[in-house]
Image (spheres, rainbow, N blue to C red):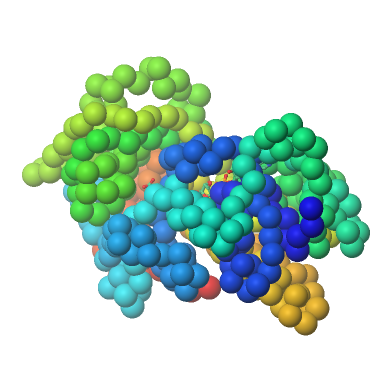
Amino acid sequence: MRTQVGIVGAGPAGLVLAHLLHLQGIESVVLEARDREYVQQRVRAGVLEQNTVDLLREAGVAERLDREGIVHHGIELRFDGEGHRIAMSDLTGGRAIWIYGQQEVVKDLIAAREAAGDPPVFEVSDVQVHDVDGDAPFITYRTVDGEDARLDCDVIAGCDGFHGICRPAVGADRLQIAEREYPFGWLGILADVAPSTDELIYAYHDRGFAMHSLRSPTLSRLYLQVDPDDDIANWPDDRIWEELHLRFEAPGWSLTEGPIIEKGITPMRSFVAAPMRRGKLFLAGDAAHIVPPTGAKGLNLAVNDVRVLAEALTAFYANGSTTGLDEYSDTCLQRVWRVQDFSTYMTTLLHRLDGDDFDAGLQRARLRYVTTSEAAARSLAENYVGLPT
Ligand code: APR
Ligand code: PHB
């Protein structure tokens, strides 16, 4: 089989890239290790920044997002039993965020691939990339039927997430890795109950961070800071609710409980691999970088990468220009580091750190500052809704 761009991974990065290329008349094939059901049901992040929504709209894949997505114009920071609103839209000239589950974005994009007659190839195994330094790279893999297959292409996009095979293919000796692990993780639940809040609540508490998000008018998504090595078996539903009540406690506010339909613990890390390229292989999304979820930026950063890559490939196929491809890694990394900074800021602002009272003093000072100074609030807001691309 031959195509122009071979894409490894049908997460948001791979699927958005395939769609943007399709709009430019550039052919691609998306190879995905999991089955379709799995990638469509996997519960991940749920906040789309303004830039992501703009891009999905321009690309004609935002019809359901515009119908079912919930636009938010502010968030709440809660500490010492009091809520403080950050009026994001007022502070950013009307920019906003949308609540729309990552798997919903994935569903819409798979539907668009199918409508174009070009669905991802699911359940492939033993994916390997070859000859990325030459002019004729190719990908080998095994199909769901157990047959060996080969995909020849001009360019390979490594959109296979943090545990994929494309980053290792760049070679450890060529990659500079910058990373940070945190001494905490997030216990996340999905609960079949109307959210107890209209806007997301980020709560700072001596017992640890807690967050109240949502997926729909009847589905709540909540998180608790926990030990990263903790076992979800230690957290029966009653204990989760009890802890959530304690960390969100505020006069005149109450949290409504409901059946927990999903729960799990994920570690948190910050990670950047550079360069995001080797020859004809380009890394995008989680394959190249990870941010802690506190800034809600993982998916949005992945979308930014493939926006840059699609523009570079469009120029390449239009007039043979390799400038965009040559600048791809540096261009993406500028935003990657901006977002790493913001995600680190949100993470260290809001989580209980293992440090001494000095850390806690600084955190309270920063929380008071960001909730009383318009300049500080605007800085948070413009990063949260996404700085213009
Ligand atoms: N071959 C083919 N597909 C693979 C392989 C492989 N060897 N390894 C992984 N994959 C697939 C995964 O099954 C997954 O569907 O690649 C896809 C990668 O998708 P994501 O992990 O979602 O990564 P990405 O598309 O970069 O999305 C960015 O934003 O909210 C954050 O971290 C969250 O997933 C999110 C990300
Ligand atoms: C989510 O809804 O899953 C979510 C929202 C905001 C975050 C992280 C996760 O910062």
Query: Residue at left 42%, top 29%?
Result: 264
For the point 59% across and 71% down, the residue is 23
Percent x, y of residue 171: 82, 46
Residue 231 horizontal side relative to residue 270, left or right: left
Report whether 94 appears left or right of 379: left
Residue placed furthest toward the left: 252
Q: Determine the quadrant in which ligand 1 lies.
A: top right
Image-based side of 327 in relation to 310, left or right? right
Q: Quadrant of residue 353?
A: top left
Q: 85 or 196, which is in the foreground?
A: 196
Q: In the figure, is residue 144 to the left or right of 358?
A: right
Residue drawn where x is 67% and y is 35% of the image: 144
Q: Position of residue 81 (x, y in %)?
A: 19, 43
Q: 307 or 365, which is in the foreground?
A: 307
Vertical relation: 314 (above or below) 332: below
List x then y, in percent, for residue 24. 63, 74
Residue 372 occupies which quadrant of the picture? bottom left
Q: How many marks?
A: 0
Q: Is residue 295 visible?
A: no
